[in-house]
Image: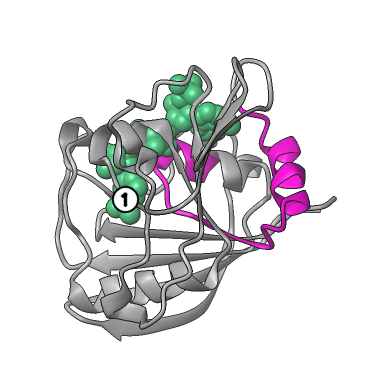
Amino acid sequence: MKKPYVIVNCASSIDGKIALVGKKPLKISDEEDMARVHKLRNECDGILVGIETILADDPKLTVKEKYVGKAKQPVRIVLDSKFRTPENAEVMKPNAKTIIVTTCKEFKKEHVEVIKCGDAKVDLIKLMEILYDRGIRKLLVEGGSTVIWEFLKNKLVDEMFVFFAPIIIGGDAPNIAGGEGAKKEEEIIKFEIKSIERIGYGYLVNFIPQYEQ
Ligand SMILES: NC(=O)c1ccc[n+]([C@@H]2O[C@H](COP(=O)([O-])OP(=O)(O)OC[C@H]3O[C@@H](n4cnc5c(N)ncnc54)[C@H](OP(=O)(O)O)[C@@H]3O)[C@@H](O)[C@H]2O)c1
C-alpha cells in the first residue's frame, strides 16, 4: 500500500485530555514544546487535522520562522466531509497551501484545493495514496481526538509523540483518541515506548504502535 510515513503529535494532560470540556481550546504545550512541534512540522510535507479542530481552535498550521530559521510550510490538509471549513478560517489564508478533503465537492483555486475522497466520511486509505502521489512522504497528524482514533484503527500511524503536561482536566473533555473506541480487548491499540524525555514543564513520550498482523 502506498502511504506517507505518518506521525501523530498531540499535547495532553496527565489524564489524557487534549482540550477543555466542551472542546474549548487550551494551550497545553509550553514554549519548549512549541519549538519542538514547529521543528517537527518543518520536517514534514503535510499537516493534517479534522474539521472539528478547525472549528474549535482555528489553527494556522504553519511553521513559525522564530523556531526553525527557514520555514518550508508543509501543505495543510483538513478532513471535512461536508465542507464546513469557514471561508475566514486561518487555513484558508494564503500563508501555505491547503487541501480540504470532502465527500461532496471538488474544486481548485489559488492556494486552496478541494478533493473528493470517500462517501459518508473521508476514505483514509484512499487519501493516503492520493497524498503519496502528490509527493507527501511524511505526514504529521495533529488531531483531534476522532481523527487520531481513525488513523490508529486503520493501522496508518508509524509513530506517535505525546507531550504530557502536569495538569488534570477531568470531565468529558476530548481524549488523545476518541471515535468509537475499543469494545473488545482485541481492538485495543498497543504501543512500545521508544523514548521518554523531560521537556519544559512536562514530558514527551515517543510511542510506536504494535499492530496485530
Ligand atoms: N492538544 C492537542 O494536541 C490538540 C490537537 C488538535 C485538536 N485538539 C482538540 O481536539 C478537539 C477536536 O477533536 P474532535 O475529535 O472533536 O474532532 P477532529 O478529530 O478534529 O475532527 C473530526 C471530524 O473530522 C471529520 N472527518 C472526516 N473524515 C474523517 C475520517 N475518516 N476520520 C475521522 N474524522 C473524519 C468528521 O467530520 P465530518 O463528518 O463533518 O467530516 C469528524 O467529525 C478540539 O477540542 C481541539 O481543541 C487538541
Is 127 displayed left or right of 105 in the figure?
right
In the image, residue 31 sits, relative to residue 51, either above or below, namely below
Determine if residue 12 is in view: yes
- The picture places residue 174, in percent across and down from the top left corner, at 30, 39
Amino acid type for the residue under numbered disc 1: Lys
In the image, residue 52 sits, relative to residue 208, either above or below, namely above
- The picture places residue 173, in percent across and down from the top left corner, at 23, 38
What SS does tag 1 mark?
loop
In the image, residue 107 sits, relative to residue 153, either above or below, namely above
**Along the viewing direction, whichever of 164 and 69 lies nearer the viewer:** 69
Residue 126: within the magenta? yes
Q: Residue at x 15, y 48 (%)?
A: 169
Q: Quadrant of residue 190?
A: bottom right
Q: Residue at x 42, y 73 (%)?
A: 71
Q: Residue at x 66, y 43 (%)?
A: 186
Please provide the residue range marked out in magenta. Answer: 122-149
Question: Within the displayed image, which quadrant is ligand 1 positioned in?
Answer: top left
Residue 63: within the magenta? no
Q: Quadrant of residue 87?
A: top left
Q: Residue at x 20, y 81 (%)?
A: 200
Is 160 displayed left or right of 201 in the figure?
right
Q: Which residue is mark 1?
A: 60
CB of mark 1 near ligand 1 (< 8 Å):
no
In the image, residue 162 sits, relative to residue 187, either above or below, namely below
Determine if residue 16 is in view: no
**Along the viewing direction, whichever of 69 and 51 lies nearer the viewer:** 69
- The picture places residue 103, in percent across and down from the top left corner, at 61, 19
Label 1 crowd bin: few (<14), some (14–19), many (20+), radius 10 Å: some
Q: Quadrant of residue 115?
A: top right
**Residue located farthest toward the right when viewing the structure as drawn:** 1
